[in-house]
Image (tube, rainbow, N blue to C red):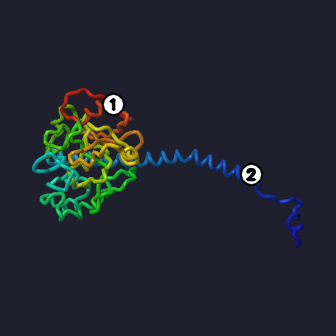
Amino acid sequence: MNQASSIYRDGRCRRGFTLVELLVVIAIIGILVGLLLPAVQAAREAARRCQCMNNITQLGLAMHHHEFSTEHLPAGVINPDGPIRSAESGEHISWVVQILPFIEQNALYNHFDQAAGAYAAVNREARQQTIPTMHCPSYPGNYRGRNNEAGIVSGNYAGCHHDVEAPIDADNNGLLFLNSDIRYSQIPDGSTQTILLGESLPFANDLGWASGTRATLRNTGTPMAAFHILYQLPEQAEPDPSEEPLYVGGFGSSHPGGALFSFADGSTRFLSQAIDPELFRRYGNRRDGELTGWETR
């Protein structure tokens, strides 16, 4: 069979796409992908935020179980004296260590020697363990820190120690601070108006989930930070405040527009990053007697 009969055996000339038609199809596909991609990303973020909400809710429930079992909330940090410095000295047992049995981490709790202190060599292996409940799925950073040579693991949730930027100490106004033993009945402002836990973004030099420093405690006196603000902007002319051992810092998240918080009544709310700073500050004080409204999103 010759070429001509192969081409014309059905009486018509077979033709494919022209270059122009192919380019048009590619352009249409590109437009469709461009339209669908934001929706797909939004759906993924919604799923991640839902998982994050579940995590912080579980931590809040663990706090309630601890309070029911011991008649007080865990101490924000256990240490002989204050103020607390972000340095590997002292006991610095965090609230996370104290609630491990209530988040199904009994083996890790039994392996951790609290009497030896958070930074003891006997506890290094424990500090290197990952606690899934402490990790937000939207966080794209490194939990072991940029300056962390020991492999110590941080987390994305912190207790509220104060309503102003000040060192962690025994006179703080929050619910979790130095050697605190607050009961739910000892919250004059009401449990629905007082932050217990919130999302946080680890600093590169944080000391991990076992350390009762700024690694696990933050305040509402510092505005909320977003991941891209905390990590991706060019270096500023001013010194990095996290280099100061007494600096604590505020809450923040990798979610667009705000962060999730667990209140003392067990509720979990998403607070907008655009929240009134004074209202946000009051949420961190258990006893200021000021009226607060709900500002969520």
Whether residue 49 is visible here, answered yes or no, is no
Which quarter of the image is occupied by the N terminus? bottom right
Near-viewer residue (294 or 54): 294
Between 33 and 228, the one nearer to me in the picture: 228
> Can you say which quadrant of the picture contains the C terminus?
top left
- Going by the numbered disc 2, the residue's amino acid type is Glu
Asked whether 196 or 17 is in front, the reply is 17
SS assignment at label 1: loop
* Left or right: residue 239 compared with residue 174: right
For image coordinates 29% across by 34% down, the residue present is: 280
Q: Amino acid at mark 1?
A: Asp
Residue 124: image x %, image y %? 22, 63
Q: CA distance from mark 1 to mark 2?
A: 55 Å
Q: Which mark is residue 214?
A: none
Q: Nearer the viewer, residue 233 or 122?
A: 233
Residue 170 pos. (x, y %): 13, 42
Outermost residue to the bottom: 1
Q: Is 109 left, or right, of 15 in this rendering?
A: left
Q: Secondary structure at mark 2?
A: helix
Q: Is residue 151 above or below residue 87?
A: below
Taking the image as shown, residue 291 lies to the left or right of residue 81, namely: right
Residue at label 1? 276
- Give the residue at the far front of this rendering: 237
Mark 1: give few (<14), some (14-19) or many (20+) Cα within 10 Å.
few
Q: Where is residue 68, by image quadrant?
A: top left
Which residue is located at x 26 percent, y 36 percent? 221
The label shown at residue 21 is 2
